Image (spheres, coloured by chain):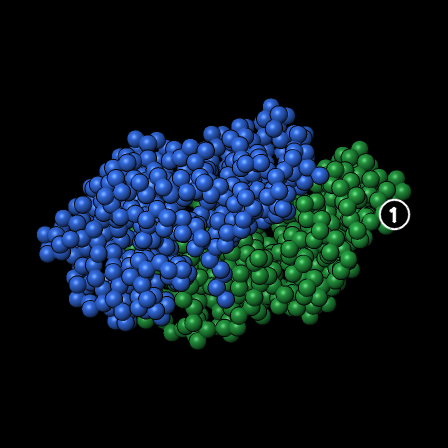
Chain colours: A green, B blue
Amino acid sequence: MTSEKETGALDAISVPTMLLDEAQTRRNIARMAAKARTSRVRFRPHFKTHQSAQIGDWFRDEGVQAITVSSVRMAEYFAANGWQDITIAFPANVREMAAINRLAAQVRLHLLVESVATVTLLAARLTAPVGVWIEADTGYARSGVRWDDAAALHELAGVIGASNHLSLQGILTHAGQTYGARAPAAIAVLYNETVTRLAHMRAWLSEHGWQGLEISIGDTPACSILDDFSAVDEIRPGNFVFYDLMQMQIGACAADEVAMVVACPVVAQYPARCEVILYGGAVHLSKDFLTRPDGTPTFGQLVKLTATGWGAPIEGAWVRSLSQEHGIVRAEPAAYATTLGPIQVGDLLGVIPVHSCLTADLLKQYYTLDGALIHMAPIPE
Amino acid sequence: MTSEKETGALDAISVPTMLLDEAQTRRNIARMAAKARTSRVRFRPHFKTHQSAQIGDWFRDEGVQAITVSSVRMAEYFAANGWQDITIAFPANVREMAAINRLAAQVRLHLLVESVATVTLLAARLTAPVGVWIEADTGYARSGVRWDDAAALHELAGVIGASNHLSLQGILTHAGQTYGARAPAAIAVLYNETVTRLAHMRAWLSEHGWQGLEISIGDTPACSILDDFSAVDEIRPGNFVFYDLMQMQIGACAADEVAMVVACPVVAQYPARCEVILYGGAVHLSKDFLTRPDGTPTFGQLVKLTATGWGAPIEGAWVRSLSQEHGIVRAEPAAYATTLGPIQVGDLLGVIPVHSCLTADLLKQYYTLDGALIHMAPIPE
C-alpha cells in the first residue's frame, strides 16, 4: 500500500498521531536539568507542554521535584500522580476556590497573584496555606504588576502580608517577549532586561521589609540559549521538552532537537499545483502559524518518517493551510519533484508542528518510536 | 464574589465552558430543514460542528435521516448512536480500511474519492458496498477533481464503474470560497458559479453513460443566505447549527442567531491599558482569528452573560490575543469605561468564538442555559 517500507510502529498508524522520540525528549530534559544544576537554581519545569504523568516521570529521573502547570485541573492531575510541589502559573482564578483548597491541603501549592482584588478574595476563602508569587509584567504586557509600578507592588505585598494563609515567595514572570526575537543576542538582551527589572522589584520590596524573596523566570527561548541563570532562583521552561517549528525559527533549538512530530496520512496529491493533502488539520495541529519570508503563513514543517524516527526538514515544502481535518502541503516545483512527488496516497508524512504545546493538547496521546502508547491527562467529566 | 447577580447555572461555572442556547440551536436547525424541504433537496447536515449524539437528536426531530461527518471515528460514533446513512466528507483515507469495512457492513456509507489511486485501493480492499461521490474542486483549490478536467473525470468514473463494491452516487463539493465573501450578492454569485460547474460535470458524465447522478453542496454561507437549492440534490451545511463570529462577519447570520458562546472567568484587569484577562485561551477557543478593520486580529467577540443567556455583542471590545490559557481582551477607552470597567475579577464574560467548530472540538462538552450537560463524542482510547 505504501511506497516506502514502514516499520511496524508506523504500519499501525491510520490517523494523525503524535510520534515521540523518547531518547531526544530525555536529552532535552537532561540538558535543561544540567543547566539549572550548574547555575544552582531550582528547575521547576512547566508541564503544560506534555501534560503526561509518564513523561513527568522522565523529569523525576533527572531529580526534578517541583513543577509548574497552567491550570487547576492540571495541578490536580499531577498531584494525583505524586507531585508534591506545584505552581499554577496563571493568575489565580477565584471561581475555583473549592479545588484550590483541596489542592492546598494536599500539596505544597503556589499561586500567582497580581491584584489586591484577587488577594483579598483568596485571603477570605483559603482554608489551607499557599505560597504566592507576585506576577510581574517586565514588558510582555499580558498579565502581572508592571515592574515599575512601585505603588501597586507596595499595596499588593501589604495585603499578602496581612493574610494568614498566603505566604509571599517571590516575584515571577513569563518574559514572552523573547518569542518575538530571532537572534540569540536579542534573547540575551531581553533576558538581562527582564532580570534587571525583577531584581529592581525585589530590591524595592527588600527595602520595605520583605527578605528572602526569590525570582522565577520561565521562557524556553532564554532558557535554551543562555547558560548562566545565577541571577535568578528558579527557571520554569516547558516547551523545550519537545521544541517545535517556532523554537527553530527563534533559534532556540536545532531541527534535530525537536522530539515530537505528527504522522499524517497522505489522502490526495495535486502535482499540477505541487500540493498534497494530509489527513491532519486544525483539530490536530492547531491553527498557530509562522510567517514565511514571502509573507505567507506556514502551519508546519514536513519531514520524512523513517524506520528509526524522522529525517531532516524537507526544504521547499510547507503546510500552507489547515481546514478542520485537511492539511494542505505546498512545495516549490523542484522540491515537489524530488520529495513529495514520489509520495503516494496512503503513505505517511511527518509534520513538525508550529507550537508543540497546542498540538499535544489537541492530540492527547503519544506513540513512541517503538509503538508504545503514552497517555496524557484525561478530559474531565 | 461577583459584581452582577448570576443565575444558578452560571454560578456553577469555574472554568471556560461552552454555553448552548438550545432554543436558538433548534431554530437554526428548523430553519435550514425547512429550506431544504421547500427546495425539495436532501438535508444531510454536517455533524462535525457539534459532534454530539444528543444534539443529533434535535436534527431527528426535524426529520433528518442522513448526515455528514469529517472522519471515520465520527462516523463510528454516530453509527453507534443509530444513524444509518452517513457520508464521510473527507478524501477517503485508505489507512483506515478496517474501520471503513466495519462501517460499510453496518450502515449506508458514502465516501469521497478524487483519484484513481484511492479508488483502486478501495476497490481492492472493500468487503462491503459503499456509495462514492466524486469530490469536485469548483474553485476552492483544496481537494477534489478540477471541474474542468474532463480527462481526469472520465478516468475516475471508469475505475469506479469497474468496481464491485463502489457505487457512484454523484458529484460533491465544498465551495469554501464563500468564506472569503463579505456580501450576500457575492455569495450568490459564487453559489451559482459552483452549481453551474457541478452541472457541467454531471452533464459530461451523463453523455458518457452515467445517469441519475446527484449534486451535493455544503457551505454554511451559501446555505444560510440563499433560499432556492432546486439546482442541487443535497445540501450539507454544518456550522449553521451554532454559527459564530466568522459567519457574522461574512453576513451569513445575525448576532442573535449565534447559539453558542464560551463563558470565561475574568482573572485580571488592567484599566491603564483598557484590558482584562480571561481564563480562556488557545486550548479553549482555538487560534482561528479574523482581521479587524485596523488590520489587527480578533480571536472573539465579547458578550455579557445574563440570567437567560447573553446580550448583544459589546461594541468596541475584542479578544486581541490568545496564549495557551489566557485570553487578552482589549477595549476602546469609552467601551472599557462603560462595559468592561465595572467587571470584577471572578465575574464571567461570554466570548462568541471566531470558529465554533474548532471551539466545540476543543471544549468537548456543552452546558445548556438550564445548566444541563451535553456530551460530545469521547476521545478514542
- The answer to whether residue B4 is above or below residue A134 is above
Residue B212 lies, in percent from the top left, at 15, 53
Q: Residue B196, percent across and down?
A: 20, 41
Which residue sits at x=18%, y=53%?
A: B213
Q: Looking at the image, which residue is at 64% across and 57% down?
A: A74
Q: Report the residue that reaches farthest toward the front.
A: B61
Residue B39 lies in quadrant: top left
Q: Residue at x 61, y 63 (%)?
A: A52
Where does residue A185 sit, x and y in percent of width and height? 64, 48
In this view of the protein, which residue sits in the foreground, A66 or A31? A66
Is residue B360 visible in this depiction of the protein?
Answer: yes
Q: Chain of mark 1?
A: A
Q: In the image shown, does A15 or A348 lie closer to the viewer?
A: A15
Residue A375 image position (x, y, % from top left): 56, 66
Q: Is B90 left or right of A231, judged from the image as shown? A: left
Q: Is residue A30 visible?
A: no
